Image (cartoon, helix red, strand yellow):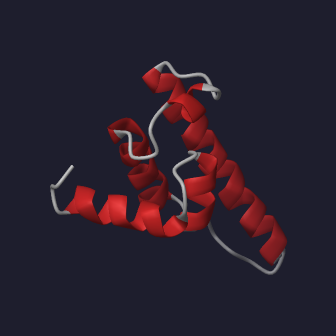
């Protein structure tokens, strides 16, 4: 996104959040999961980890936000899961 004088920090953050929400919804839809399914899946579920990796790569959202959105525990736990995935341990 091109940032100009007409874009405030709040507007840019809102856009980032909207993009992250859209990607999360699309990811859940691709999995065939309803929002309530997130709570029933393990925090380290492979599909959740892959979706978290996508959100991390394609948005500016924090680990804390992603972990909360996908119901994956703490940001530290998510960081460990993503590191393990990158190293091929998942």
Residue 26 on image: x %, y %: 54, 32
| Residue at 62 percent of width and 48 percent of height | 69
Indicate the quadrant where residue 37 lies. Answer: top right
Q: Is residue 51 above or below residue 75?
A: above
Position of 58 with respect to 3 (left or right) is left
Q: Is residue 10 above or below residue 51?
A: below
Seen from the viewer's position, the closer of residues 82 and 4 is 82
Seen from the viewer's position, the closer of residues 20 and 3 is 20
Most extreme residue toward the top is 32
| Residue at 49 percent of width and 34 percent of height | 27
| Residue at 35 percent of width and 65 percent of height | 80
Most extreme residue toward the left is 88
Q: Work out whether residue 27 can be spotted.
A: yes
| Residue at 38 percent of width and 47 percent of height | 49
Where is the N terminus found, in terms of image quarters? Answer: bottom right
Residue 71 on image: x %, y %: 58, 46
Q: Work out whether residue 61 can be spotted.
A: no
Indicate the quadrant where residue 87 lies. Answer: bottom left
Residue 20 on image: x %, y %: 61, 51
Position of 10 with respect to 48 (left or right) is right
Q: Is residue 17 above or below residue 28?
A: below
Total marks drawn?
Answer: 0
Residue 86 on image: x %, y %: 23, 61
């Amino acid at each position: 996104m091109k940032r100009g004088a007409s874009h405030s920090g709040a507007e840019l953050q809102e856009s980032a959040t909207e993009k992250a929400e859209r990607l999360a919804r699309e990811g859940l839809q691709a999995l065939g999961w309803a929002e309530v399914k997130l709570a029933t899946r393990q925090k380290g579920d492979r599909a959740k980890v892959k979706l978290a990796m996508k959100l991390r790569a394609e948005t500016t959202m924090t680990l804390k936000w992603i972990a909360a959105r996908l119901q994956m525990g703490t940001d530290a736990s998510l960081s460990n899961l993503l590191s393990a995935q990158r190293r091929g341990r998942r």
